[in-house]
Structures are given as structure tokens and as C-alpha cells.
Amino acid sequence: MSFSEETYEQLIEVLMDGDGDEGEAIIQDELEAGHDPLEIISQLLIPALSAIGEKFQEGDIFLPELMLSGQVATRISQKLEAIIAASGETAQTLGVVIVGTVQGDVHDIGKNIVATMLRAHGFEVIDLGRNVAPSAFVDAARQHKAQVIAMSSLMTTTRPNIQNTIKLFNELDLRGQHCLIIGGGSVTAEWAEQIGADGYAADAAAAVEMCKRMVGGR
């Protein structure tokens, strides 16, 4: 890593504390030291976020720290992307992910956290919001050429609409073009396998890692 261990650890702490001003100050110091914005994103910001995700999955930190880190990372990455755009370079995304809460379900807190974390890790995220019909997932997948479709369901009564969405992708012979993953309080890994989903993520950190694997495998 071309960044000092001290800077790396400091950024992790700042992200978990939700201190956007201090986060931007760290990044500004690295810019002034001559580091390229793309290098800062790929070799400092994303590794720090990945470390925070591991802490969350191991139970060392909790949801508030995870949410704060995603929000600060998004703020920092937007600053860096603006610098990249002004220089005429292109910030390469890891891939395109469609996210949405399935039809009949209006809960979106978990979905919003997943979208924030995916953006912070370098994905282009198309957020369809709540109460998303199967056809809307299909239309967005086609329009944006998304590698991953991430569906959320909190209410057990809306689980059939996950199945309906997967069924529609199958009927249109689109499964080879998109990975369909699911999450939310009403679903489990066993049920995801049963209905033929490509994956299940129990939390935002797991969703990020799953999307990385799926994009990398295509």
C-alpha cells in the first residue's frame, strides 16, 4: 500500500465516527502529498471500507458505525470524483447494481444502507425505491445493463413478489445477463436457494462482497 498504516487506521476511525470534515481533511492531505484521486479511492478508501465491513460482520462494530462510514465515504468519493471529472479522466466503476424493495413493501431503510455502501465501494447504483414491480426491475436491468439486481423484502407477505421477479427474468431468458440477489428481514439463505436466487446477503457488508464476487466473475 502506498499510503501509511497510520493514515489507513486514521481514516477507518474517522469513517466509523462519521466525521466528514476530518475525512475530507485526510483526503486533502493525501492529494497535496501528490496522490492521484483514483489511487486514493482504490488503495485507501475502499480498503478502509472493506476493513469496516469485516469488523461489522465479526460483531466488533454495529449498524450505526457501518451507516456513518458509508455516508462519509460517499461524501469523500464525491469530492474525489469531482476532481477526476475536472481533469478529464473517467472514474471506472466496479459495475452497475439495480436495487429496490419489491412490490407491496414500503420499507427501505435496509435497502438504503446497501445502496450507500455499494456506492462508497465504487459501484454505480440505480435505486428504484420502494414498491417496485417485477417489470420495473426488468426494464431497469435492460436500460442500465446492470450486472446485479438486488431485491429487498421485509414483509413476509411480499416474498412472492421476489419469486415473481425471478420468474419474469427467467421467462424473458435474461438470467444469463444478470445476477439476482435478495436480502431483508423476511428472507433467508435457504429460501433464496429454494426459489433460485443467485445469492442472499444478510447485511450491507455481505451484499457489497457478494456484488464484488459476482461482477468479478462475469
Image: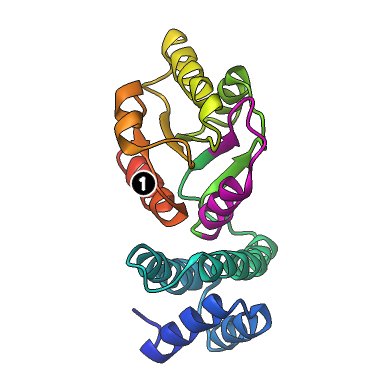
Relative to 189, residue 89 above or below = below
Q: Amino acid at mark 1?
A: Met
The percent coordinates of residue 185 (x first, y second) are 48, 42
- Dividing the picture into quadrants, the one containing residue 215 is top left
Residue for badge 1:
210
The percent coordinates of residue 51 (x first, y second) are 38, 70
The percent coordinates of residue 210 (x first, y second) are 36, 46
Magenta segment range?
Answer: 98-120
- Dividing the picture into quadrants, the one containing residue 23 is bottom right
Residue at (44% x, 74% y) in the render? 44
Residue at (50% x, 68% y) in the render? 41
Residue 165 appears left or right of 86: left
Q: Residue 115 versus residue 39: which sits nearer the camera? A: 115
Relative to 105, residue 119 above or below = below
Residue 160 drawn in magenta? no
Label 1 neighbourhood size at 10 Å, few (<14), some (14-19), many (20+)? some
